[in-house]
Every structure is written in structure tokens, then in C-alpha cells.
Image (cartoon, rainbow, N blue to C red):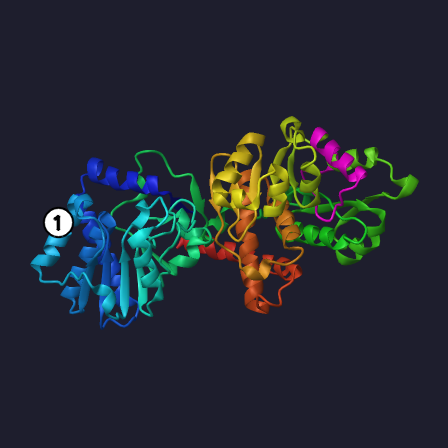
Amino acid sequence: MEFLLSAEQMKHCDSDTIEKIGIPSLVLMERAALSVADEICRSGCDLRSVLVVCGSGNNGGDGFAVARLLDERGVRVTIAFVGNEDSMTEETAAQRQICENCGIKISSNFMQREYTVIVDAIFGIGMSRDAQGRYAQIIDWINQQSAFKVAVDIPSGVSTDTGKILGLAVQADLTVTFAYRKIGQVLFPGTEYCGRVVRRDIGITADRFQRGIPNVFTYGEEDLARIARRRPYSNKGTYGKVLLIAGSRGMSGAACLCATAAYRSGSGLVRVFTTECNREIIQTCLPEAIVTTYRDEGSDGRFPAKELEEALDWSDVAGIGPGFGTGRLQEEILAAVLSEYKKPLVIDADGLNLLSRQPHLLYETEASVILTPHIGEMMRLTDNTKEEILEDILRTARQFAREYGVVCALKDARTVVSDGSRVYVNTSGNNGMAVGGSGDILTGMICGLLAQKMPPFDAAALGVYLHGLAGDAAQEKHSAYSMIARDIADQIGEVLKRINDTEERKEE
């Protein structure tokens, strides 16, 4: 697990390390600058002519120190100070004086020359408003240059907290960030402006959090060990029974994909509750599944009370929505499930569209609910615009989860999962997963993890991560252009093989 920090949290880490641990600010600055200089030299870029653009804050101080360290290595360096003399921090003023003492040129007409490398040390994580005036002109000029561009901590103009572009931002090829990655380096569009991100330790460690552990994080492959090991003495009941209320006329594929993913993710038994017309298709597609059907046409479209009650009682976990339809009968089934079910429940796709008509049902249910909306479904659930949701996607998911007492997995290029407090930001996956049926696979995977008694938030977060890893494996095999949802399901097993590798590494 890797923490992702906001600007405020990172500033607290800095100040606590300085004031409570006793590491001087200039020492942290020197370590930061050394890490940037090292990464520049490692990158293989052309070092014939380097420009370091420095602001007034401590990010500018980092830049001055980078320039000096490169100069010590024989690199031809020019410094451009573009900040305000009157607002220069004490540390930055000290680093500037050292550079002057070393005879390093500080240029006022830097735009008149060409450079092979440009280092952005203008704002760092402290920028909170749009770049304007001279700063906007400088950022625009940097972006127009053919030089290799390196950002110190974060590209100037990228919001540290949201990834939003503050008017204009430096388009870096390499970003060297300190201690922890920042939220805005992971979220779009900020992540596209960071280029390759390298995180370097400078003496600010997790055991030095003085104000609580950060509640935004992402996963790495070591987190596959969170999935419980299969026990030697076990049976199909050991790994849980999943009920999927899915599929309608012409939409049997959603139920098949969802059920396949639930099995592939480790559940012991999967039962599909669907319309009668889908029975033969599902039994042919997935003979391992149990199939219970109801009629939804004409006079036979009665509410299947007895069948639904029996299926819900049988299950340990339920999922509802993939290919389900949005008719009157489906609306009644969803209301009944939310009213009667008291176990983990995943709602997706048409289930979310039905829920948007009666969101008050979430206040009344005793089920442990996970919702998996994409942006369009979230618009219907909240009556917010796309722009309002994406303005701060973490806040959107967190507030919705807190208001309704659910886990919200808000799907986007960077899916975020929140229980109202914690926020998981997913970094696995690729654009080949933007294909019909991909969401059905995710629903089945989350249900499969829930069936193995994983807590709802953990199941949602890890399910999203595994879904992305399976998508990455499918992309490697088929290419992003040729992937279909079934390819993702087919790669779940390949990803889960890595659990043994992770455990073996732990034991070494």
C-alpha cells in the first residue's frame, strides 16, 4: 500500500520533520535537490545546456540547489529566477546566495537561448490558483521548447490535490517527487503532465506522521497478499455463495460475464437469477453456474417473490444490475432486495439506473452496499453535471459514500473507492478496458472477493485493482485495440497466480 498525499499533508510532514524531529529545512532541501540531480543524470538526457527556472518559494530553493549540484558535476547550468524578491523564503534566499558565491549565472534574458534540459522549480505543491500574467507566459514558453523537461516535486500548474490544470501547466518528461507521491500526480489530467514519476526518500518517513495516517492510498502487487489463502481442508461452501440478479432479453452476456468473473475470483458457488429466456444461454456459456429464472413478459410478468426469497436466503453475497433492465418488474425486484437483504450487496449498471429513481432506499436498507457507478450513472444518482463530479472526484465519491452509508467505487480512468473516510485510488488498468462488459466483470470480481469474507471496502478496492491488473494482462496478450471483456475475465487466473509469488517473497 502506498499513501498519496495532499498539499496540506505534505506541508505538515515537512514542518513536523523540521520542528519535531529536528532535521533542518536546508538539509531536507539539499536531499531533495540531490535526488533531482541524480535522476537527471540517470535519465540519459542531453546535458550540454541546462536551464533551471526558480520561483520564490522552497521549490525554487530546491531548484537553486539542483543547479549548484549539476554545476559541481561539470554541467553547463543557467538559472532563471522568475519569482518575487520580496517573497523569497529564507531557505531559497540562502540557496541563491550559495549559487552566486559559486559563480553560477542567473539570467534575466533566458528566453533568448536554447537548452537541452529545462528544470521546472517555479511553484511545486504550493500552487492553488490559475497561472496568470508572466508566470503563464513562462510556462507556455517552457512547453514550446524541445528540451527535456524535469519537474521538481510536481509540474507547476498541476493541482496537488485534484490533478486539475490550474490554467496552464508544465508538460514534464520526468517528475522527481519527494517522500510520497501526491494525489494530483495520479489523477487525470495531472498524471499526463508529470511524465515519468520517480519518488525519492529525503528523510520524511511514515513513522513520522504526527497528525494521523493519510486516508488516500493506492495498491501495489504486494497487496495481492490481502486475499486469503485457500485452505487445504475446504469445500465449495468454504469460499462462499454468490447470487447475481442479472440479465434480461438480449442481455444474457452481462450475466455470463459477471458470473464467470465471480467464479474466477475464487467464489465457491455462483447462482444467476435471470429471465427465463436466458436459461439455455447461461447454462451453455457457464455450465458451472446455478440458474434460477422468472418470467417478465405479458401476464406472466409477475413478481417472483418465492423464487427471489429462496435465492437471497441461499446466498452469502448478492450482486444486482448487469444487463438487468429498467422495467417496472425490475424496479420492484431491486426494492425488495434492498428491503429484505442484510448481507453484502453490489449494485451496478441497470441497478444503479433504477436506484436513481428511488435513492432513499439506501437510507432504509440493512445490506452492506457497494455501488459501482461510472460517471454517467453518478450523474443520475446525484443530479450533478460531469464537470461537477470531475472537479474533485475524490470528494465526490467520499461525500456520496458518507451521505448514504455505502461504499462507492466511482469508475473512471482512475477509479476511486471510498467508504466516506478512506479513499483508494486505482492505478492499474488501461484504455483497452473501455469496452462493453468490462464493468460486469468488475461486479463479479467484487462479489467473488466478498464471498471469501473480505470486508466491503477492501473487496471493492482490491477488486478494482485486480480488475485493472487483469486488463493489463489482457492488453499485453491482445493489444488495447483488440481486447474484449471476456479477455479480462480470462486473465484473472493469471493475475491470481502472483499471490503465491508474493507470499514466497515475504518468506525469503
Residue at image coords 60%, 58%: 434
* Residue 459, image quadrant: top right
Q: Circle 1 is placed at which residue position?
A: 94
Q: Secondary structure at mark 1?
A: helix
What percent of the width, then of the height, locates residue 83?
22, 51
Classify mark 1: residues with Cα within 10 Å, few (<14), some (14-19) or many (20+).
some
Amino acid type indicated by mark 1: Ala
Asked if residue 200 shows in the view, the reply is no
What percent of the width, then of the height, locates residue 125?
32, 47
* Residue 80, image quadrant: bottom left
Q: Is residue 463 above or below residue 35?
A: above
Which of the two residues, 163 or 484, is positioned nearer the viewer here? 163
* Residue 482, image quadrant: bottom right
Q: Quadrant of the C terminus?
A: bottom left
Residue range highlighted in magenta: 313-339
Q: Is residue 114 above or below residue 301?
A: below
Instruction: Say whether residue 328 is magenta.
Output: yes
Q: Is residue 195 above or below residue 236?
A: below
Residue at image coords 14%, 49%: 93
Which of the two residues, 195 or 308, is positioned nearer the viewer here? 195
Asked if residue 469 shows in the view, the reply is yes
Judged left or right of residue 323, residue 8 is: left
Which of the two residues, 391 or 6, is positioned nearer the viewer here? 391
Instruction: Say whether residue 212 is magenta.
Output: no
What percent of the width, then of the height, locates residue 149?
32, 64
